[in-house]
Image (spheres, rainbow, N blue to C red):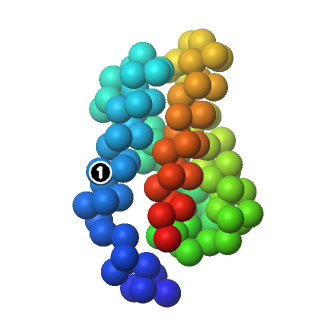
Amino acid sequence: MEDHVTRFVSHEYRNKEFEKMVKKISAEGGISVELTRKFTKEAMHEWEQQQHQDVLTLFTAQPQTLNFEISKMLENLRDKLRPVIISKKRIDRAVEIAANCLENMYHIL
């Protein structure tokens, strides 16, 4: 199934959307783009390890499953950002931005 998904969702598209998300989170959290990128990649990688699946599977997930899996990924991201973003309000806003970006990215099919 992943081959089927890969045909429709290009690597360039995923990278472009990921970078847009990283820049938005960075701006809201007041931390560098590099640090945001690092923590976001780590959060997504941890989700992959916990779920034993690739993020590409989210492109074909049912809406309820997709929302549940995104929420798990966001908890990983929140845990990563907590030590570097002091304000709970800023963390909440950064995670909200990530949620919107991830939902938009994975709802394209």
Identified at 62% across, 72% down, the residue is 61
Q: Residue 25: which quarter of the image? A: top left
- SS at mark 1 in the image: helix
Residue 83 position (above or below residue 24): above
Residue that sits furthest to the left in the current view: 12
Identified at 40% across, 26% down, the residue is 26
Residue 91 position (above or below residue 61): above
Q: Residue 14: which quarter of the image? A: bottom left
Residue that sits furthest to the top in the current view: 87
x and y percentages locating residue 63 in the rendered image: 68, 65
Of 34 and 97, the residue lying toward us: 97
x and y percentages locating residue 42 in the rendered image: 46, 46
Residue 16 position (above or below residue 11): above
Side (left or right) of 4 relative to 93: left
x and y percentages locating residue 107 in the rendered image: 54, 61
Q: Is residue 55 visible?
A: no
Identified at 53% across, 34% down, the residue is 97
- The tally of labels here is 1
The kind of residue on which mark 1 rests is Lys
Which residue lies under the disc numbered 1? 16
Of 85 and 28, the residue lying toward us: 28
Q: Is residue 22 visible?
A: yes
